[in-house]
Amino acid sequence: MSIDFNGRVAIVTGAGNGLGRSHALELAKRGAKVVINDLGGARDGSGGSSEAAKAVVADIIAAGGEAIAHGANVANFDEVQDMVAQTMEKWGRVDILINNAGILRDKSFAKMDLADFRLVMDVHVMGSVNCTKAVWDIMREQNYGRIVMTTSSSGMYGNFGQTNYGAAKMAVIGFMNTLVLEGQKNDIRVNCLAPTAATRMTEDIMPPEICAMLQPEAVTAGALTLCHDDAPNRMILCAGAGGYASTRLFETDGVFIPQDQQSPETVLEQWDGICDIGNQAELASGMKQSEKFLTKAMTYVQAN
Ligand code: NAD
């Protein structure tokens, strides 16, 4: 099966460098018209320049593709709305949004300034929210939309010095989970990508021979499977160095403890049953957990 994006319009945030650049080049190569968004700041989010985004646009046009640059700061909703308005004016639709823009402000939690926590949350979480909000009604009216959030193993599993980044990266998974439910009747599919790649974000923490194995293009191959016509929904795809895996959230079946016996001691006594992965399941919504617990309670009530 070959994947093309002919006739599709894509916005890729943070596409001036690294992974976003790689996603944008491949989308354009496969027929998409691409908005190259980039604030052009440093790795920690300071400063700004339009040079990186313009260079990617020039590369795409030189290769025969179509692209425009926009320097919106994704954390600023007015600027994001302007970007989407310009996209609509030029191409009349938005089919794909890859929320990729990101920064780092690493420090152990003990030393972390709350301003650095807020800024990282603002760029990754509110940046993804702002861009999604700005295209959501367009995608609903089109009855078509593909949105990719960029999460991280740091959020799913933790990384020393990254409480801010990890919290932000886990938040976009929660954002996806409900968007999936609200977008499905309009064929809006939302997925997450957890990359590992050598970019300016990671280049100084790994030796050059390891960086050579971590090409952004390997991640892009996975990213594009999340935003084509037959894309999945609610997938968390992990990709790096040619490895591809899926992270999924399962819940154990758990136990039921009757009202007259509920205490920390009885919960502790049931620990093995609570943690038993034998009948674990992936739940399609938060309501499914309530249904599971209430079914157990009703079964007990009926039997007694
Ligand atoms: P990168 O620094 O090379 O690229 C990030 C781009 O985002 C930069 O061009 C930057 O100018 C842009 N940007 C930053 N803040 C912005 C803002 N407010 N508005 C618009 N653009 C902004 O980093 P990368 O490694 O390519 O990271 C891309 C995404 O992948 C990020 O979300 C990052 O957290 C995530 N990620 C990367 C890795 C990895 O191994 N490289 C691992 C996990 C997650």
Image (tube, helix red, strand yellow):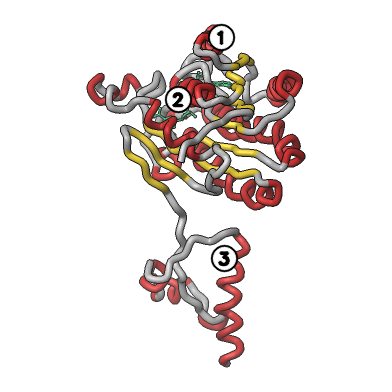
Badge 2: few (under 14), some or many (20 or more) residues near its Cα, within 10 Å? many
Determine the residue located farthest toward the left in the rendered image: 209
Give above or below for 242 relative to 75: below
Residue 50, located in which quarter of the rendered image? top right
Q: Of residues 141 and 195, which is closer to you in this image?
A: 141
149 to the left or right of 208 = right
Three-letter code, disc 3: Gln
Give above or below for 259 relative to 19: below
Mark 3 or 1: in front is 1
Residue 163 is labelled as none
How many numbered markers are drawn? 3
Q: Earlier in the sequence, mark 3 or mark 2?
A: 2
Q: Earlier in the sequence, mark 3 or mark 1?
A: 1
The percent coordinates of residue 7 (x first, y second) are 63, 28
Q: Residue at x 37, y 32 (%)?
A: 196
Please say if the residues under marks 3 and 1 sit with CB atoms less than 8 Å apart.
no
Distance Cα–Cα, label 2 vs label 1? 16 Å
Q: Residue at x 62, y 15 (%)?
A: 68
SS type, badge 1: helix
From the Cβ of disc 2, is ligand 1 less than 8 Å away? Answer: yes
Residue 19 is labelled as 2
The percent coordinates of residue 271 (x first, y second) are 39, 70
Residue ID for mark 3? 289
209 to the left or right of 36 = left
Mark 3 or 2: in front is 2
Three-letter code, disc 2: Leu
Q: Can residue 102 be spotted in the picture?
A: no
Badge 1: few (under 14), some or many (20 or more) residues near its Cα, within 10 Å? many
Residue 54 is labelled as 1
SS type, badge 2: helix
From the Cβ of disc 3, is ligand 1 less than 8 Å away? Answer: no
